[in-house]
Amino acid sequence: MNINENYQNLEESYLFSTVAKKVNEFIQKNPDKKVIRLGIGDVTLPLCKAVVDALHKAVDEMGIQATFRGYGPEQGYDFLREAVQRYYLKRNVQLELDEIFISDGAKSDLGNILDIFSKDNTVLVPDPVYPVYVDTNVMAGRKVIFADANGENEFLPLPDESVKADIIYICSPNNPTGAVYNKEQLKKWVDYALKNRAVILFDAAYECFVSDDSLPRSIYEIEGAKECAIEFCSLSKTAGFTGTRCGYTIVPKALGKLNKFWLRRQTTKFNGVPYIIQRGAEAVFSEKGQAEIKENIGYYKENAKVISDTLEQCNIWHVGGKHSPYIWLKCPNNMTSWDFFDYLLENIQVVGTPGSGFGKNGEGYFRLTSFGSKENTIEAMQRFKKLFS
Ligand code: MLT
């Protein structure tokens, strides 16, 4: 047998695993120190009441012969797909039910979708960005090229007509920089994709954090996007499903065979999200659920403000946090991202994510998340203030 040697071309370990390993080593050596984690974007607020009630009800149904369910439809139950359909309709995006695929989260689908694309596509990935886009393509041996995101373009690269790409990743609001494309900018990407017969893989995992109604939350708010874009969405950050696992992917039928092939792929390799979880996810889209998750998102945004205000006071350059749970900052004193990571861990026991882990343009930058508890965020920022002012 031959193994997939492409794995040799990956970093030794996944970014967030490396961070976790370093933090665990530190804790073992310093068990008396209180470490505050503002690294991986994992939520801390519990599931909202509407979701918990729906989960309980579904558990009871599973224990009764008449309402027990076995295998469900691989692409998700209609009740949840209809809820997603209504959610999009609120923003005047009309989707057909068989364009909506329920999944166990955006991360899985972002990797799995590559099954339906040939290996010889050229992939364009912004740099810096969520590392899963690059890693999954490296695993498949695909050629990856980069679109530079930097201070000059406010971390929002636009298409370069001289570059030929077949698969384009866009993450807006962006992980890690928190930058958001406006409609005119996204239209440029849609036009580029249509002209080049490329497909955009649009990661909308943080759409709920967009606070300005004029900014797009779905790429389908842009004319022509249904002919060139697949959208990935997740309830992880929106509704606290990081541990519960549920998301959805939109593959428009206007993309021709891709919709059919994705269904074929999912029916073969995936058995669907558990019924109980899908009932919980359905409740996210109810009136009560929407009001409750809005409150939770407001809580995280308050944390983001605490972080931004502190960085401001410490004269540390930063962006993000307004339409996103992430704050992207320049490491003080020209430190490298990993040096700054070690410096914070050693001196104030605050964990963030090194910007260089998101790509070469992330070197010298650092990401903090607002997903911690209010108390921990305030404490972490007090420690920051002491260290930097
Ligand atoms: C992050 O911190 O970038 C995310 O939590 C990672 C993820 O969603 O998989």
Image (cartoon, rainbow, N blue to C red):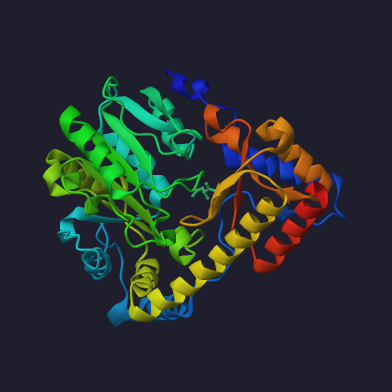
Please report the residue visible at 47 percent of the width from the left and 77 percent of the height from the top: 52
Question: Percent from the top left, x then y, of residue 48?
Answer: 48, 75
Question: Percent from the top left, x then y, of residue 69?
Answer: 30, 70
Q: Quadrant of the N terminus?
A: top left
Residue 32 to residue 123: above or below: below
- Left or right of residue 304, residue 250 in this image: left
- Left or right of residue 270, residue 27 in this image: right
Residue 163 visible within the image? yes
Q: How many marks?
A: 0
Residue 64 to residue 373: above or below: below
Residue 63 visible within the image? no
- Left or right of residue 126, residue 114 in this image: left
Please report the residue visible at 17 percent of the width from the left and 35 percent of the height from the top: 194
Question: Percent from the top left, x then y, of residue 353?
Answer: 62, 43
Instruction: Choose top left, top right, bottom left or bottom right for residue 292.
Output: bottom left
Task: Give 246 or 226, whichever is nearer the viewer.
Answer: 226
Please report the residue visible at 21 percent of the width from the left and 66 percent of the height from the top: 89
Please report the residue visible at 32 percent of the width from the left and 59 percent of the height from the top: 214
Question: Percent from the top left, x then y, of residue 77?
Answer: 25, 65
Residue 363 to residue 272: above or below: above
